[in-house]
Image (cartoon, grey):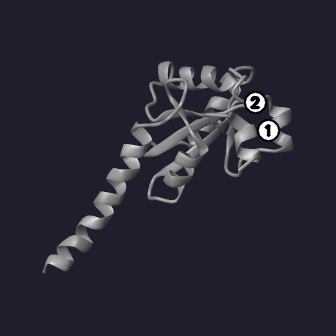
Amino acid sequence: MAALLALALLPALISGLIQLRWNTLESSKEGEVTLATVQVLENSDKRVLWVDARPRDRFDREHIPGAVVLNEDEWEKAVPDFLEAWAPEKQIVVYCDSDSCDASQAVARRLREELKLENVWVLKGGWDAWRQR
């Protein structure tokens, strides 16, 4: 009976550890998340929606698989495609070129403020971090 109870609690413990790690991120800016943390989420039951805040030509050349493009230059045009890919249970991770790029912070802010979305994060290191993985 104890073994069955322990087996039943295992998913809850794993989920709790993932959430704890997510909430205690080591980042320099509020709302940033490391690639390692996102990869843990992707390997769990959490779903991640990648949002590429770079210009469309960079997105068209190369992007994280499954990402949607949503940048400030095309905000009005791109929001419907973003909303089609979005679901309330998804963690939204926005990225641009690197730490020195502010586009991801701006897009994340607009998602939080204008669309009133939660679970919006910025990938620390951006596209550079993804390429170096």
Percent position of residue 28, x then y: 55, 25
Residue type, numbered disc 2: Arg
Quadrant in which residue 106 is drawn: top right
Would you say 62 lies left or right of 95 here?
right
Does label 1 or label 2 sit earlier along the sequence?
2
Would you say 55 lies left or right of 95 here?
right
Quadrant in which residue 80 is drawn: top right
Percent position of residue 15, x then y: 35, 55
The Cα–Cα distance between marks 1 and 2, rounded to whole angstroms, is: 6 Å
Would you say 64 lies left or right of 120 here?
right
In this view, the residue in front, 102 or 47, is: 102
The residue that disc 2 covers is: 54
Q: Residues within 10 Å of mark 1 (few under 14, many from 20)?
A: some
Residue found 82% across the figure and 44% down from its top: 62
Q: Residues within 10 Å of mark 2 (few under 14, many from 20)?
A: many
The vertical placement of 11 against 100, above or below, is below
Residue type, numbered disc 1: Phe
**Quadrant holding the N terminus:** bottom left
Residue found 62% across the figure and 30% down from its top: 79
The image's mark for residue 59 is 1
The vertical placement of 51 against 110, above or below, is below
Say if mark 1 contacts mark 2, CB within 8 Å.
yes
